[in-house]
Image: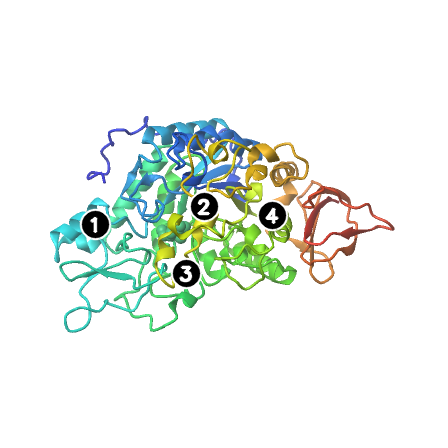
Amino acid sequence: MTQHPTEPTPDRGPAPRQALATAAAPRDWWREAVIYQVYPRSFADSDGDGMGDLEGVRSRLTHLRDLGVDAVWLSPFYASPQADAGYDVADYRAVDPVFGSLLDADALIRDAHALGLRVIVDLVPNHSSDQHEWFKRALAEGPGSPLRERYHFRPGQGEDGELPPNDWESVFGGPAWTRVADGEWYLHLFAPEQPDFNWEHPAVADEFRSILRFWLDMGTDGFRIDVAHGLVKAEGLPDLGSHDQLKLLGNDVTPFFDQDGVHEIYRSWRTILDEYSGERIFVAEAWTPTVERTARYVRPDELHQAFNFQYLSTHWDAAALREVIDRTLDSMRPVGAPATWVLSNHDVTRHRTRFGNPPGLGTQIRSAGDPELGLRRARAATLLMLALPGSAYVYQGEELGLPDVVDLPDEVRQDPSYFRAAGQDGFRDGCRVPIPWTRTGPSYGFGPGGSWLPQPGDWAELSVEAQTGRPGSTLELYRSALAARRAQPALGAGESVEWLDAPEGVLAFRRTVPDGPCVVVTANTTGAAVSLPAPGEPLLTSAADGAVPAATDGRFPLAADTTVWWLA
Ligand code: GLC
């Protein structure tokens, strides 16, 4: 941890740099942007240690350009003991040696910009690592240390303070409090190695303003804010009073999640961001009970985007999808923010596997389900998502149609929540397996060595190499979809969709822009073909054979679990 935030660190990169130049940047680029999440551990490994790194990412940037995304979001690569895969940050201004150096980060940002790709980095403000300099000193100095005020240290309850200060539980399972040797307890909403910051303390707020500037000066185009709903805790840290806390998470406002005070912080951050040129953005990871509450994070003077987790959690079902789409658009319209669609990320079972399982299992699924059905639906769901107004996020590997790896042996698992009983998460390693680039070679071209999590033996045909140029492959579907989205502004534009009549289980809607062709989207979420009026000329289908059956008498059969885009 740098003691004096404004002092340059020894391996600091070149002088403050611009974000991707404003010159070529269309205004409001982020409103319809497709942003690709790189999970650096699992993307590409340049040095053969089995762990991906920044140089690996840099070497594969052309994949992202060829895919046609606008920006990349990098999960944390900062100095960290990796107790939670880097979401436990020990030094916010340093790159962990396992991922490279600040100079590598600088080179990556520069190369991405040269390819027209913006770079968004992850900011982890709810908690630090227990190896952060502040926390180490807070522990060493003992009760009464001013450093303890930057975290939540409390005496325990009970005769000898042997009980935690309140009844909060960690998201990863078990109590949210750990007792230290001198008898005090500290709060950690996640793993014990992730102590929560006390955001009431001015030094915490100052430190994060400085960290924002550090990465903005490095030329990054924005931040994904980790646990954006968690920074502020209710005054006095009151008991939750529920014995079923995990059910409340994401479904209710709690004394530790979605407190109103967080918005003040984002207003202050927004003024910093707006001092910088190039339309840099914030995207919130805010698990809130409703899309209406998510909309509060993207009011005009706060953040730009917030992931739509209600959408992510919706099964492949026309009525449920229509409802969440409408509710989202109705919530975002009044605050003037774009909807931000997402189907997969590093914390949930990949959508191919979710959709291959029955509904109602949540976002952490332990069964492979029906992988073929899952793939068909996942492809259809992607075309549906990419035709909705607003921005969309793509998680690395979904463009290859990767399934979750549900049968990892216990001894290779690293997700800290797997080892804590009854946590909300626990099976996140399955979506973090390094991605396959080539048919052959160690770790399918992930790197010159192995991979930190074992890859399944049948991933050769899922590799980028195998799918490139193969008609009907999932990779080519994503490329075609993103190219069509660029060519047809109607696909991402606007704030509403115009619903068309459709039989049960089918979604049909029109997307328009002034003075441009309109696109009609038809999505069949049922397991049987449905006959529909042909709305125009087919533009793209999610069907693996790439074919849309010809219309007879103006009607065509929309295949089971298939989405088709039409130029109308
Ligand atoms: C966020 C991250 C997740 C992490 C947690 C604690 O939810 O996405 O991976 O475990 O925060 O930082």
Task: Report the Cα–Cα distance between label 1 and label 4.
Answer: 43 Å
- Check contact, mark 2 vs mark 3: CB within 8 A: no
| Quadrant of residue 12 within the rendered picture | top left
Residue 135, label in figure: 1
Q: Position of residue 219 (x, y in %)?
A: 39, 32
SS for callout 3: loop
Q: Is mark 4 within 8 Å of ligand 1?
A: no
Crowding near pointer 1: few (<14 within 10 Å), some, many (20+)?
A: many
Does any portion of residue 510 appear in the rendered image? no
Residue 424, label in figure: 3
Crowding near pointer 4: few (<14 within 10 Å), some, many (20+)?
A: many
Q: Amino acid at mark 4?
A: Thr
Q: Which residue is mark 4?
A: 382
Q: Amino acid at mark 1?
A: Phe
Q: Amino acid at mark 3?
A: Gln
Name which residue lies at 22% across and 38% down.
2
SS for callout 1: helix
Q: Which residue is mark 2?
A: 432
